[in-house]
Structure formats: C-alpha cells, structure tokens
Image: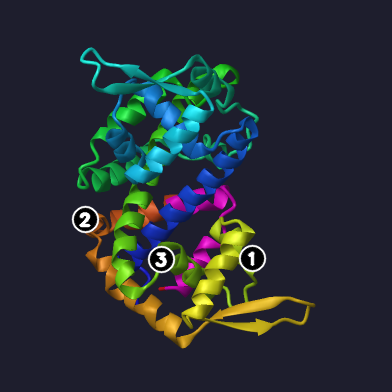
Amino acid sequence: MKRNDMAFQLHSFYNLSRYLFLKIEYTYNLEVEKYNITLPQLRVLWILGCFPGISQDRIAKIGCWTPPTVSDIIKILFQKNLIYREETSNKKTHTLKLTSLGEEKILETKIKKDSNIALLKLLNNFSYEELDLLFHTFKFAIITEDNKYILEYIERLNELELKFDFNDFTSKEKDYIKKLVFIYNLVRIFVLTIQTKHSSILVDFNLTYPQLRALNIIKAFPHITSSELSKIGFWSKSTANLIARNLYKKQLICKQKGTVKNSIHINISDKGESILSYDIKNNLQHIDIINTLKNLNNELIYVNSILSTMNHLVENDLINNIILRTY
C-alpha cells in the first residue's frame, strides 16, 4: 500500500497521537507522584477547582472515565481529606468541593520550569500556525463526539493556571504553554475516546485494549522481552508480565528461551498476526471519531509530520517502527 494513502495516514495519526499522549501522561504522573497523589486524582481536583459542586457524572465525562472509576478516585480523595461534600439548600443532595488541603495540593503539584515532564520538551519548537492546525484538527474530531464541554474545562484550567507555576516563565512562554496544555488535553480526550470505543469492539474477540496494544508492539519488535515490552508500552513490569501471560494462554504469542540466563523472548503467532490484520482493516473502520478525519485529505499528512516531530522531541522515536511494521 502507498504510504501516503488515507488509510495509512489515519493509522499514523492514531498511533502518533496515542504514543504522544502516553509519554506525556507517563512523565507527568511520575512528577506528581512525588507529592503522594496520582495524576487521575489530581485531575479530579483540577475539575473541582474549575467547577465547584460539579456532579460525578460530569466529572466522568470530562475525565473520560467510567462512573465506577470516578467513584474510586473520589473515595481516595475523601480519605486524603482533599475534598468534602457540601449540603445543598434542599438537604437531599450534596456537592463536591475542594478542602483547603485540596487547594494546597493543587498549588504544591504545579509544574515548574525545571520539572521533568515531556510536555515541556515541546516548548518553543513549533510555530503558532502549526499549533493552531493541531488544535483545530483535534477539536474537529472531538466536537463530532459531543465533547464540546471539554473546551470549557480546558479554557478554565488555563484561566485559573491550575497546572503550571508560571513565575519562572516569560510571558511569551506562558502563552505558548497554555496552547500546549489545550492541545495535550484534546489529544488525551481523542485517544481515550477511541480506546473506549475500540475496547467495546474487542470484547467480541476476547481481547482487551492493552492486549491489542501489546500485540502491536510485539509484532513491531520481534524477540522482545517482557521488560522491553513494559518500557515501550508504558506499563509496570508486573502489568507487562500479566498481559504477556494472557496473550500466551490465548495462543496469540510464542515464547522462546534467550541466550542470557532466564531470559524469555516473545514473538507474535500466526493467530495473533491474523487478529491484528483484521483489526486494522475492519475494526478501526467502525470507530467514527477516526472516520471523520478522512475529510482532512492531504492536510493530515502535514499534521502527522508535526506529531512525528513532537514524538521525536519527547524521545518516542520507536513509534515509527510501530506504525510501519503494524500497517
């Protein structure tokens, strides 16, 4: 197939967006965990900071989480005394709000200029025209998914400056970072929306979304080890081991002893190959958020070149192998 055809460009856009999101999210989470909180927990605090009293259903929509996931996060935030419930006037319902400790946690975890997060590696490396193109591309895709509310959240997030401590940044850098924050949040919603839709399709194949991702990585890097799989997939070693074990039970991968003591190399099986081939040719065609991008035509090639450069800057160079070897 031609490398500039629309199917390949959509495949590239999906994977470039996904791995850019994964790298930024991974490094961001490592940074905030220093303050005894996870990024999803902090994200709920941001949402409550933007919209005090917001319902859990709306938190789930903004965060792209399931209601049970939000309930679990809320319970932890209560245990940490970072949020509280306030009675409404009719005393039958309660609204969620930040405690003083919750407000302090947001201040404490603000990203500084010397913070080690991948998003800062993108600073001042693209023109405003390129950033605007990315913004409009992801906004176009997300709005078709009835996610207009996310725009209000990101605008409020930037307005209140909840994510960054801008004291050591110039005014120009501050403006630039706010554009990056907007784009990153749009990329996040785009990727997680696809993940939700893709996961529901994979149920019929007795496959989970992480297992499919692992299959793609294993195909792209023959003889990979479980340790290498965890690094490329942004999983813990225990999670990567569990995914590989389940794939092996389903006969989707093969294992082979390496020359180094106790080392095991993993390869995709013929059965795994057939599932990946079917997924790219058929399953992805049923995800409407991807299909809407077909209207972008040649513009998508330029968008992908920008995303490719972004992945390079955040040291996601292996993504090109994943794209080329899994198409």
Taking the view exactly as shown, the residue that stands out farthest to the top is: 89
Relative to residue 313, is residue 296 drawn left or right?
left
Counting from the top left corner in percent of width and height, residue 83 is at 45, 23
Is the C-beta separation of discs 3 and 2 under 8 Å?
A: no
Q: Which mark is residue 165?
A: none
Neighbor class of circle 1 (other Cα within 10 Å; few <14, some 14-19, many 20+) is: some
Neighbor class of circle 2 (other Cα within 10 Å; few <14, some 14-19, many 20+) is: some
Q: Which mark is residue 208?
A: 3
- The kind of secondary structure element at disc 3 is loop
Q: CA distance from mark 2 to mark 1?
A: 34 Å
Q: CA distance from mark 3 to mark 1?
A: 20 Å
Q: Residue at x 56, y 48 (%)?
A: 313
Dot placed on the residue nearer the N-terminal end, 3 or 1: 3
Q: Residue at x 62, y 30 (%)?
A: 35
Query: Which residue is label 2 attached to?
Result: 292
Neighbor class of circle 3 (other Cα within 10 Å; few <14, some 14-19, many 20+) is: some
Q: Residue at x 46, y 87 (%)?
A: 270
- At label 1, which amino acid type do we have? Glu
- At label 2, which amino acid type do we have? Thr
| Picture quadrant where residue 158 is located | top left
What span is colored magenta in the figure?
Answer: 307-326
Q: CA distance from mark 3 to mark 2?
A: 25 Å
In this rendering, the answer to whether 85 lies above or below 7 is above
Residue 116 appearing in the image: yes
Query: Which residue is label 1 attached to?
Result: 228
Is the C-beta separation of discs 3 and 1 under 8 Å?
A: no
